[in-house]
Amino acid sequence: MFSIIRAFAIILIALLGGKAIAYLLPFSFPASIIGMLLLFIAFNTGLIKVHWVQSGAHYLLTYMALLFIPIGVGLINYFDLVITQWPALLASITFGTLIVMAIVGHVFQRFNPRD
Amino acid sequence: MFWLALPLTLLCFFSFRKLYQLFPFPLFNPVLLSLLSLIALLVILDIPYTDYATGSAPLSWLLEPAVVALALPLYQQAQQIRKQLKPIFIACTIGVTSSLLIVIPLAWVMGADQSVIASLAPQSVTTPVAMGITQSLGGIPALTAAVVIIVGIVGAAFGLPFLNRIGVKDDASQGLAMGAAAHALGTARAIEHSEQHGAYSSLALILCAVLMAFLAPLIFAFYMLFLP
């Protein structure tokens, strides 16, 4: 239990740091990504030991997909837009996603030095 | 409904997750099935979304900490990734550029109006970044949030079988492609598959978000010169 509380506390501190930096930036950038970079730097400098965070982070990462459901249900408010503009939405979501995936996968596979 | 929102969401997700473990077909994606069931339930019982959103808010609060936690797989794979920083950067830049070059004209050809095009443009990056970009382009941030989630579901559900089919076989390339095209939901799926998938996916998630924030306004402005 202690290890989970410690892990969440560290993650929240990194997130708060991210929020503070995001607030100071002259353009809008997500605080959570700055928080991730802060935690990453803390791991690299040895300020935070990986095993302090491991247990809590494990739960968050394992069930991350669950956390998107409430926002996704918000689609319910846009039924009228979906009904009038569904061809454009469907085309860009499916083709856009699969083509980008194919391009990134193949480009990286081509340029990636084998070891 | 307020107090039922959270238990119902958990019940949906964990039962569909069990179903997916028994029958791992892409269309049995737990997030997809949970969304469809919960939306159907709200519509049938005529429950306002705000009630559901308030009740399920604890899950949304954990979204930001979960993104922070991605530092862990990133750190664990950092040695390996450092050697490949240049190809990773090239692949992500080409990925973000091609996403914008495909999505904007495609949506236009299919008859979307300008605010919808602006809402679709940043569809491949993580929700908070995409919503910020949409706002600056004059789109509808809430529509972007929904579109980004669907992109994530499509990527998470079909990504790995699709990549295998088109000959992208190694863990690193698959992870990078999942993160670049399907952001955090793709990453969530990638982490389930292997730690290496997860590390490359979270790297692509970060890098593509940053690149999109810079490139989307440029390319969108360029298109607006030509589109009526």
Image: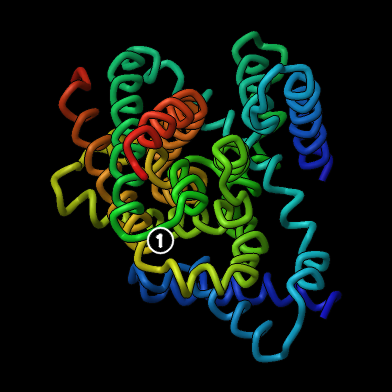
Q: Quadrant of residue A10?
A: top right
In the rendered view, would you say A9 is above or below B60?
A: above
Q: Quadrant of residue B41?
A: bottom right
- Judging depth in this view, the residue of B23 and B209 nearest the camera is B209
The residue depicted at 28 percent of the width and 19 percent of the height is B87
- Judging depth in this view, the residue of B209 and A65 nearest the camera is B209
The residue depicted at 64 percent of the width and 27 percent of the height is A29
**Given the image, what chain letter belongs to the residue carrying mark 1?**
A
Q: Position of residue B179 (x, y in %)?
A: 42, 40
Residue extending furthest front? B228
The residue depicted at 59 percent of the width and 68 percent of the height is A78
In the rendered view, would you say B36 is above or below B204?
A: below
The residue depicted at 42 percent of the width and 34 percent of the height is B220
Q: Quadrant of residue B95?
A: top left
Direction from residue B138 to residue A86 in the image, left or right: left
Q: Is residue A115 at least partly visible in the picture?
A: no
Q: Position of residue B156 (x, y in %)?
A: 41, 55
Q: Position of residue A100 (x, y in %)?
A: 29, 42
Q: Quadrant of the C terminus of chain A?
A: top left
